[in-house]
Amino acid sequence: MNSTEPETFNPFIPNKYMFVIEGINDVTFNMTTGSVPGLTVGAVAAPYGANSGVVSGDRIATEEVSLTFTLDEGFKTYKTAYAWLTESVTKDVSKDVTIILHTAQNTKNVSVRLVRAIPTGLSAIELTTIDEGIEPISITLSLACDRIEFL
């Protein structure tokens, strides 16, 4: 390939998302929505003579993330998230959480690890029979983590 030719750009069109929690091998959470956490670096004022400028901070902050998953018939996914959240109140239960993204061809494409994640919230289970369509029940698990890694 000639170095002056532009690279081919293939947009990522995901088909399926899931996440797994380190040490909980028998539960896979099938996601309906979620995100890779945002990252921020604070700017620090730096005096320069009579003026001031800014320099990059020395820490990267990782935003909280919300992962929405479908509830299974036996409530195994909810019970697992509930147990992790309630246990976090009394001891350090940080675990790595891996988000797995699949392509439109349903092949594993990218995995993102949330390092030392802790649960910070679990949404209510909303039960309704009024909806016209049959939609699975979704639950949202909120997490904070130290950093992210692309695998």
Image: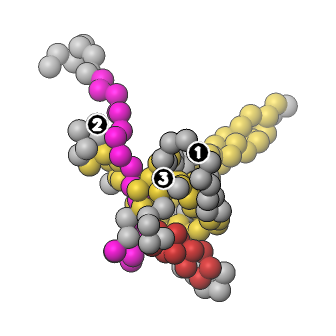
Q: Residue at x 44, y 53 (%)?
A: 31
**Residue 139 at x, y = what percent?**
56, 59
| Residue situated furthest left in the rendering | 1
Q: CA distance from mark 2 to mark 1?
A: 29 Å
Which is in the foreground here, disc 3 or disc 1?
A: 1
For residue 115, say whether it is visible: yes
- Please state if 67 lies on the left or on the right of 7 as rendered: right
Q: Is residue 101 magenta?
A: no
Q: Residues within 10 Å of mark 1 (few under 14, many from 20)?
A: few
Identify the mark nearer the N-term, 3 or 1: 1
In the picture of the structure, the residue carrying the numbered disc 3 is 136
Q: Residue at x 49, y 48 (%)?
A: 135
In the picture of the structure, the residue carrying the numbered disc 2 is 104
**Residue type indicated by callout 2:** Ala
Image: 52 above or below 92: above
Q: Residue at x 22, y 18 (%)?
A: 3
Q: Residues within 10 Å of mark 2 (few under 14, many from 20)?
A: few
Which is in the foreground here, disc 3 or disc 2?
A: 3
Q: Residues within 10 Å of mark 3 (few under 14, many from 20)?
A: few
Q: Is residue 16 magenta?
A: yes
**Residue type indicated by callout 1:** Asp
**Residue 145 at x, y = what percent?**
55, 62
| CB atoms of marks 3 and 2 within 8 Å | no
Identify the mark nearer the N-term, 3 or 2: 2
**Label disc, if present, on residue 131 of the rendered structure:** 1
Residue range corresponding to the magenta coloring: 9-26
**Residue type indicated by callout 3:** Pro
Residue 141, by quadrant, is: bottom right
